[in-house]
Image: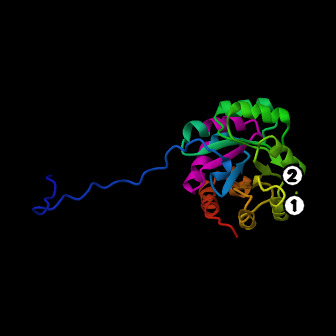
Amino acid sequence: MSAPSTPSGASPPPPAVSPAAPGPVAAPASPLDLGPVLPVAVLDDPADAVPLARALVAGGLRALEVTLRTAAAPEAVRAVAAEVPEAVVGAGTVLSPAQARAAVAAGARFLVSPGWTDRLLEAVRETGVPFLPGVSTASEVLGLLDRGITEMKFFPAEAAGGVPWLRALAGPLPGARFCPTGGLTAASAPEYLALGNVGCVGGGWVVPGDALAERDWARVERLAREASRLAPG
């Protein structure tokens, strides 16, 4: 069949272009700048990692923290790093230098810990990936600032003082920037995001355990889409 003709002197219409799929994400300068919410997942089956990451990306959240609380976690990190290049996968609950090195070897592009020690800080610095060490007191924040670290995880956020704690710290320690995690919800997140010293919030609610158990990726995508649109309250 011949192509349809065009009127004399008229340019042919441009070819249709399909929407581009999300491409690989550059290495993050900071996990705090990857989106308003950093989803936190506890995975028992590494086979769930890739569909989970794809559901999050489809919903507008490209970052995923896989906690090292289960035996499946290292393989889950490895699978996302290899098969979902448009996602930025990190490892959480990093407690030792050995875990930090193994997570990065598996493909983790950032690391998160509930606390910190000088030995852990030294090991993570050697890996070269961004790191969010956990804090819950002003002394811990001051200790990290003294070591040149300005970005931290505030954990457990709700139990350790929540929004009032972060607001109170902004005056005396303005150089610190946080990702509050622990007990937050879609309803409480905007109040945290409104604070000048908060870059993002950790969101376990985006990856609920029952959704994982049921492999309800449509629900995860919907929760991710809602979280990606969260704005300061």
Would you say residue 66 sits in the magenta stretch? yes
- Which callout, 1 or 2, points at the residue further toward the start of the chain? 2
Given the image, on which type of amino acid does mark 1 rest?
Gly
**Residue at 68% from the left image edge and 67% from the top image edge:** 232
Q: Which residue is mark 1?
A: 161
Where in the figure is residue 200, as x and y percent of width and height?
A: 69, 56
Q: Which is more toward the observer, 231 or 152?
A: 152
Would you say residue 5 sits in the magenta stretch? no
As drawn, is 21 to the left or to the right of 72? Answer: left
Question: Cα distance, mark 1 to mark 2?
Answer: 8 Å
Given the image, on which type of amino acid does mark 2 rest?
Ser
Where in the figure is residue 127, as x and y percent of width and height?
A: 70, 31
Where in the figure is residue 198, as x and y percent of width and height?
A: 73, 58
Residue lying at the far left of the rendered structure = 8
Is residue 105 placed above or below 177 in the rendered structure?
above
Q: Residues within 10 Å of mark 2 (few under 14, many from 20)?
A: many
**Residue at 15% from the left image edge and 62% from the top image edge:** 10
Kindly indicate the quadrant of the structure image that contains residue 125: top right
Whether residues under marks 1 and 2 lie with C-beta atoms below 8 angstroms apart, the answer is yes
User: In this figure, what is the number of numbered marks?
Assistant: 2
**Residue at 78% from the left image edge and 29% from the top image edge:** 98
Q: Which residue is mark 2?
A: 136
Q: Which is more toward the observer, 150 or 76?
A: 150
Q: Circle 2 sits in a helix, a strand or a loop, which is it?
A: loop
Kindly indicate the quadrant of the structure image that contains residue 77: top right
User: Quick one: quadrant of the C terminus?
Assistant: bottom right
Query: Which residues fall within the magenta stretch?
Result: 50-79
Is residue 187 placed above or below 112 in the rendered structure?
below
Where in the figure is residue 11, as x and y percent of width and height?
A: 18, 59
Q: Which is more toward the observer, 163 or 230?
A: 163
Colour logic: rainbow
Q: Residues within 10 Å of mark 1 (few under 14, many from 20)?
A: some
